[in-house]
Each structure stands twice: as C-alpha cells, then as structure tokens.
C-alpha cells in the first residue's frame, strides 16, 4: 500500500472556494490562505435539522485506534450516500508532530489535506494563542517589577508561559536573573495546547465571551492568600486583539472533497480535549451532519465532551461512534507487542471487557452507541465475529470500518447506520454530575461512575 504522503500527493484537492460552496458559503465569506485553506466568520445558530455525531474510542494504546481516521472516513461516507456533511476536528499541536505521536490529519485514504500545512503552522492560530498567553505572563512579571500594586506573591504565581514545542528543558526554569531585575522566581513553560488560553478559546462563543473568560483567569495569589485574576492586570482587551483572527474556524477538505472545519486543540488530559464550540456550532449551522471527535478514550474525552462542552454550549449528539481495533482489545487483554498481530481469542475476550465498559458508560450518558471496528489486515474473521457478538450483547450497533484502505467505500455501511440512528430524536444527556456540585463531589462522581472506583480518599 502507498504511504499516507504518497496517497495525499496522488489526490486532486478542489479549490477552497468550491469547498465553501458545498456549505453554502460564497467566495466573499472566505478569508483564503492560498488555494486550499480559509478562515470563515463564526455562525452560531444551528440549523433545525442538524445532526451532531461524536467519535470517541476505547482506551488508547501505543498503536492508536484511529479516531481521526474514522472521523474523516465517516464524513466521506456520509457524503457518499448523499448527506450534506461537515467534519469538525481539533487542530494538531506542533510539538507532538515532531514526537512519537506524529500528525493528526487521519491516515490512508481517510485524510484531511493539506496535511503538512495543517500539522505545522496552519493558519497561525497556535502562534496567536502562544502570544496571547505570554502577553499575560509578561504583564504579570512587569507589574511585580514596577511596584507590585496588587501585592502579588512572586512565589505563588500560577500562570505559566507556553510554546508549541516539546522542550523538556523549559518545564521548570528560573527567571529574573538579569542584574537590573528586582526579583527572581521559579517559572515554567507548558505546551500551547495545554495552556488555559487554548481551553478558553475553545469554550468561548464570541469575542465578548472570550474577554470575560480571560478576565477570570487566576494568574497568582497575593501575599494575604487572595486570588489575583487577569482582569486586575487590564490585559484582556490586548489579549482579545491578538486572538481576533484565531477565534475564526479554519476550512479545509478531505481527500474526497468533504468540508472540514479544524479549530482549536486543547489536550483532554489537561482540559476538555475537544475542538472549539465556535467551529462545532458553525458546522451545525452550515451542514445537516457534523462529525466531531474527542481526545483520548471515551472515559476521558467523551466524558468531558458531554459533561463540559455539551453542557456549556447547549449541544447534544444524536449518535456516539465508539472506535476500537482488534489489536487494542488484545493489548488490553494482556497480549504483548510481539504477538499483537497474531490470532489470540483469549486475549481478545479479556480485552473485550474494556469495550463493554465503554459501551456501558456511554449508555449511562443516555446515548445511542455504534461501535466502529477499525479493521486491519491481520484481523481474522473469527475475531471480528467475536467483537460483533459482544457489541450485540451490550446493546450497541456494530460496523466494520475500512476507511484507511478504501476511503468512503469502506465506511458506507457505517455511514448508513449512523444516518439511520440520527433519524431518531436527540436524547437528553444524563450528565455525570450536577454543575452546582462541589469539586470534591464532581471528582467522586466521575471516579465512581466512569472509572468504577469504590471511593475517593
């Protein structure tokens, strides 16, 4: 089989103006970056018939389960059966692109293009977020240097600088070593995707809401132990000016010409792990079917998507697609790396308990669930039949997904089943916790309901 890059190079992408036209957008509605990328103005009112579809996965393994690949393949599959569809994805972080994880634009014949641009600088959003974050950090230290009217305790500054690169040496540093400085203090960098500005941008509904969220950031404690918020630094207007273009979703396409909005990318283990509310709502305004994804496994990403993003934005998915692979189930069943591609029904049966737990969790959220088995060449018919039977016993729909190898032709069955599920009314989400619960109670409910903990001590 051709490599991802060879497959992408053989594709013939359409001009981004034609992609915009598929969503009813005229050329004047696009701020183009060359022929294949554009930014669009946010559109927040969902169409009455819009169907939101969440793609999540079983516990992540070193092999990857293929959430983005299935998300792209399903979007192409829905377009193949005549649906007006738009995918809504997270923006890749530059650091992991150069690490073991690599890029985040799908794979095989289910890719988003231009992948190199998307995985690297794209349309500049991450750089704007980095600048906005570091402006707050600079103004904070400048305030302490020039008199410290807010009585900030330099030892209790909690707002860190950021950069979009994996650089271990900058995790913990000491700043202010120049002789003219009045103080030194310990500081550190986080990767941009883990910054509070990234999380805020992805939950904001517009610039006004973004400003309110920025003002509410706790940046430090004063010497009496009180909270110091960004509002006290009078920095929010400047931060929002830096983000005025970054708040707009980015429009690109799949290899088959399906529209994709890519915008924002907070990590799920740090923040909520979803693309921006603005991009999701804009997609729902422009298309009848919107396929989006949540980071990590369903126990983390889907939980945060439903409990945080959907609650905050007033969203409700019609269908949840749970991605899994034979090899990930065998890995969760204790199979070692060397034997992962060999038939092993015993390990598969043990790992199947992981899949059952995820199905149960999603059903406890009151969601319609379909399992998409991302097929690999090493998967045997007996192994696939076992997973199919397990899903049927657990009350979940099942489909074998071959988007990586076949593009939309390999996801047509999944697309038809998802479209059929979407004909049903959206179900009210059974949230894990109440928004009014204390932090302790929220932790207890998540730990016991999602992870199966007996208690939290």
Image: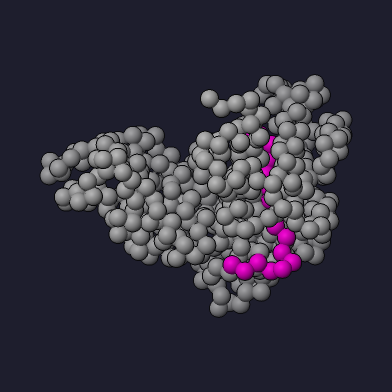
Task: Based on the picture, tell me whether residue 129 belongs to the magenta stretch.
Answer: no
- Image location (x, y in percent) of residue 10: 67, 56
Predominant secondary structure, magenta span: loop
Q: Residue furthest left?
A: 180
Classify residue 153 by image quadrant: top left
Classify residue 334 by image quadrant: top right
- Image location (x, y in percent) of residue 11: 67, 58
- Tell me if 320 is positioned left or right of 250 in this view: right
Q: Give, as a single range, the part of the protein colored magenta.
A: 44-61
Q: What residue sits 30% from the left and 59% below the top?
A: 234
- Image location (x, y in percent) of residue 299: 64, 37
Q: Is residue 114 above or below residue 363?
A: below
- Closer to us: 130 or 149: 149
Q: What residue sits 58% from the left and 33% below the top?
A: 444
Q: What residue sits 57% from the left and 48% below the top?
A: 435
Whether residue 127 is visible, yes or no, is no
């Amino acid at each position: 089989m051709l490599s991802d890059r060879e497959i992408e190079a053989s594709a013939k992408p359409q001009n981004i103006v034609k992609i915009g036209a598929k969503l009813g957008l005229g050329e004047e509605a696009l701020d183009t970056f060359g022929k294949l990328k554009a930014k669009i103005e946010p559109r927040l009112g969902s169409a009455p018939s819009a169907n939101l579809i969440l793609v999540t996965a079983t516990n992540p393994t070193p092999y990857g389960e293929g959430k983005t690949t299935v998300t792209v393949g399903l979007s192409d599959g829905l377009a193949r059966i005549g649906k007006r569809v738009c995918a809504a994805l997270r923006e890749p972080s530059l650091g992991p692109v150069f690490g073991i994880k690599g890029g985040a634009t799908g794979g095989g014949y289910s890719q988003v293009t231009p992948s190199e641009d998307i995985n690297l600088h794209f349309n500049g959003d991450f750089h704007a977020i980095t600048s906005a974050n570091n402006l707050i950090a600079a103004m904070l230290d400048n305030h302490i240097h020039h008199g410290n009217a807010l009585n900030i305790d330099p030892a209790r500054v909690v707002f860190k600088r950021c950069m979009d690169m994996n650089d271990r040496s900058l995790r913990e540093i000491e700043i202010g070593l120049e002789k003219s400085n009045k103080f030194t203090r310990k500081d550190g960098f986080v990767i941009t995707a883990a910054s509070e500005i990234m999380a805020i941008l992805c939950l904001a509904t517009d610039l006004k809401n973004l400003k309110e969220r920025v003002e509410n950031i706790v940046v430090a404690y004063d010497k009496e132990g009180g909270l110091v918020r960004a509002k006290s630094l009078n920095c929010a207007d400047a931060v929002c000016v830096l983000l005025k273009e970054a708040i707009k979703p980015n429009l690109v396409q799949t290899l088959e010409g399906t529209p994709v909005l890519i915008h924002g990318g907070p990590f799920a283990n740090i923040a909520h792990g979803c693309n921006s509310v603005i991009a999701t709502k804009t997609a729902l305004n422009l298309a009848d079917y919107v396929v989006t994804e949540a980071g990590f496994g369903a126990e983390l990403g889907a939980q945060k998507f439903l409990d945080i993003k959907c609650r905050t934005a007033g969203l409700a998915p019609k269908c949840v697609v749970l991605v899994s692979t034979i090899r990930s189930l065998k890995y969760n069943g204790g199979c070692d790396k060397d034997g992962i591609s060999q038939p092993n029904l015993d390990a598969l049966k043990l790992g199947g308990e992981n899949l059952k737990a995820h199905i149960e969790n999603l059903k406890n959220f009151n969601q319609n669930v379909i399992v998409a088995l991302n097929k690999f060449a090493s998967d045997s018919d007996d192994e696939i039949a076992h997973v199919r039977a397990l899903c049927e016993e657990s009350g979940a729909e099942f489909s074998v997904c071959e988007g990586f190898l076949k593009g939309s032709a390999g996801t047509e069955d999944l697309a038809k089943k998802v479209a059929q599920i979407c004909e049903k009314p959206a179900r009210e989400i059974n949230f894990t916790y109440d928004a009014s619960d204390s932090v302790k109670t929220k932790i207890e409910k998540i730990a016991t309901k999602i992870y199966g903990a007996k208690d939290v001590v």
